[in-house]
Amino acid sequence: MAFDLIVAVVAVIAGMVASVAGFGIGSLLTPVLAFQVGTKLAVYLGTQGPSILQHWPHVIIGIVGVTAGTLIGARLLRRIPESIFRRIVGLLVLAIGIYMLVRPT
């Protein structure tokens, strides 16, 4: 249950980033899924589109979260200055890069 909540929260954030930056869903959700299912399966789940729905129920939660995040991100972009939003996206990308460098294998 806690993992589902984490996937949903990350999916919302990924949708927010992807709605304006054009990336974020795979690069944010794949590392989260890797904690639960391992890297190979996480990459598979993050790249197979609709076929994942029959293999992993957590992805359904992710899809709902990404949809919500996309709507929230589009609305936020209208309300906050672009320079602030760029910094937020930059920090997310930097955090992912740092995580990928220091994560345990």
Image (cartoon, helix red, strand yellow):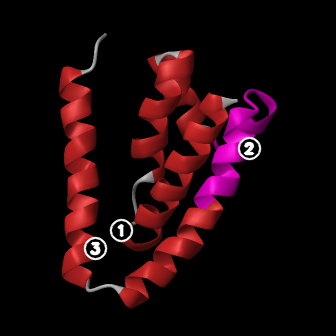
Kindly identify which numbered label has been placed on residue 98.
none
Which residue is denoted by mark 3 in the rendering? Answer: 85
Q: Position of residue 2 (x, y in %)?
A: 63, 30
The kind of secondary structure the magenta stretch mainly shows is helix
Location of mark 2 (residue): 60
x and y percentages locating residue 68 in the rendered image: 63, 65
Q: Quadrant of the N terminus?
A: top right
Residue 74, compared with residue 98, is above or below; it is below
Q: CA distance from mark 2 to mark 3?
A: 28 Å
Q: In the rendered image, which residue does mark 1 sit on? A: 21
Q: Based on the displayed image, in which of its 4 quarters is residue 23 positioned?
A: bottom left
- Residue that appears at 73% across and 44% down: 60
Q: Residue at x 76, y 33 (%)?
A: 57
Q: Earlier in the sequence, mark 2 or mark 1?
A: 1
Residue 87 located left or right of residue 62: left
Which dot, 2 or 3, sits closer to the camera? 3
- Against 38, is 52 above or below? below
Percent across and percent down for residue 29 are: 49, 40
46 magenta-colored: no
Residue at image position (72%, 29%) is: 56
Q: Amino acid at mark 1?
A: Ala
The kind of residue on which mark 2 rests is Ile
Left or right position of 36 against 19: right
Q: CA distance from mark 2 to mark 1?
A: 23 Å
**Residues shaded magenta:** 49-66
Q: Look at 54% across and 57% down and name the residue there.
A: 12
Q: Amino acid at mark 3?
A: Phe
56 inside magenta stretch: yes
